[in-house]
Image: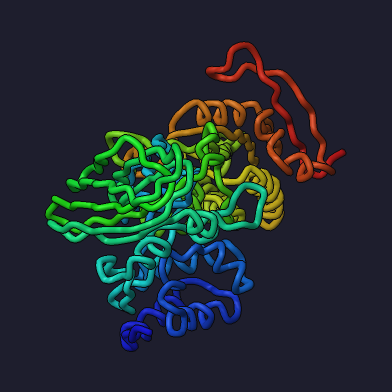
Amino acid sequence: MSDVQERLLDIKMTEMELARSWSPRVISKFESLIRSGDDFSLYRINPLAFARDHAISEAESIDLFLHATRSGLFEMSWDVVCPQSGMVLDSFGALRTLKTHYVCGLCDVSGETDLDDFIEVTFTVSPQLRRLPFHDPASLSVEDFHWKARFLSDARLPGQQARFLDVLKGMVRGLTFLAPGSVTTMRTELGPGALAGINVQSQASFAVPVAGAPAVAPTLLRVRYDGQRFSASLPAVQPGPVIVEIENSAALRGSLLLINWPPEILAQTAKPVLDFDPYMSGGMLLARQTFRRLFRSERVDEREGLGIRQVTLLFTDLKGSTAMYERLGDLNAYALVREHFALLEDTVQAHAGAIVKTIGDAVMAAFSRPTDAVSAALHMLGEIERFNSEHGDPSIILKIGAHCGPSIAVTLNDNLDYFGQTVNVAARVQSLADAGEICISEALFSAPDVGGLLSGHRLAAFEAPLRGVEGTACVYRVTPGQM
């Protein structure tokens, strides 16, 4: 096990303890991981898995690793994962460098992924704190280089417990590094189907059919690798013994993973999307208040936005704010509005969301889960009622609206923001709410488990025109605590 830099750890753990109020033993569990965890357990940590394994809340686990990254204990990575193989195709250290286009040579697929689909945010211990072999991939064994550094271990065949990695290993016929300027020879036995080879770093690949009568003498297949692509000398090979000679004419080391795909896999029109354990997606992270506060410098590339398949946007506004300013005076009214902003921010953060921005007296918040947004809205009205009661004057009258759908993450005015039709509809839905009411769109009302959250509250459906939506749309008016 690598040595831990004790002085640095002591300094940073003190910073962590003071960063926020933690649940009992959270910090000690975290320190134990750093000191006692094996190398692989400190590489690409999934904070949701850490929460599950250490009996702490997901929200606290996410905050734990965000604060640890901010302090320099860990490094954060935005990993692009192939949905059909679980291979980590690329990793980016900052949001502004993230590219969502992916190419998987193993699956022979390419495409675009959204922030909340197959962009996983993971955390690796800093090399300044504890050096791991994974910090220097060139030092890894060929097995660790492939199976631990490039594939997610939890990817499973759909609806099954079988790990895809175990199934894949059963079809592997060779695994090797390709030294620059060298010829590497591999001998194997092939069954009918296809022989495929891939460099898991560059995603360069080749495939030749394996068909015909079984060969008695070994077939010689020469493969040339130039650093960017493979080219095979034969259009097909027979089942049976095969000698594969790989010439690497490039100046850099390559690698080769040889797979014998069976006919039943080749017959599939498309490889199925695998099942993964819950993980923190890029979209989920953007909707975390702690991330926005600690990493204010994170930006989306100004030349392009990043797609999000689904985000729930919530808008609030104050009813009668002009009259409030006239009654209380500008300074007193502004102080009250600031207090209400702080209350809403605490409520949003408590429900796993983030304040995107304030617009006058209004707030725009984002949530990765629809149920979190609805729970936050209900809680907001309760908190405002308590706030007004404590102040002895019902000065804050809140109106709330929310909608969920696809959006684009952008940087506007040096702030991570959302752009698109979902934003417009959410704002319009909020404008339909009256004092002490929540209006939600049909899309949000229909999201899983939202209906259950609203049982016990008065609901009224009505038709209303929504910006950018042809004709009218169904909107639900929620009056909390009334039947």
Q: Residue furthest front?
A: 216
Q: Could you tell me which residue is drawn at 50 percent across and 61 percent down?
A: 153
Q: Decide if residue 326 is in sight here.
A: no
Q: Quadrant of the N terminus?
A: bottom left
Residue occupying the point 35% across, 37% down: 236
Vertical placement of residue 375 versus 23, above or below: above
Where is residue 475, by image quadrant?
top right
Looking at the image, residue 33 lies above or below residue 328: below
Looking at this view, name the residue that lies furthest to the top: 471
In the orientation shown, which residue stands out farthest toward the right? 483
The residue nearer to you, when weighing 138 against 369, is: 138
Residue 246 seen in this snapshot: yes
Q: Position of residue 322 (x, y in %)?
A: 54, 34
Q: Position of residue 243 (x, y in %)?
A: 31, 53
Q: Foreground: 173 or 347?
A: 173
Image point 39% across, 36% down: which residue? 110
Q: Quadrant of residue 350 in the image?
A: bottom right
Q: Quadrant of the C terminus?
A: top right
Numbered disc total = 0
Above or below, 14 relative to 408: below
Q: Nearer the viewer, residue 126 or 345?
A: 126
Residue 403 point in image, percent of width and height: 60, 33
Taking 59 as reference, is 360 left or right? left
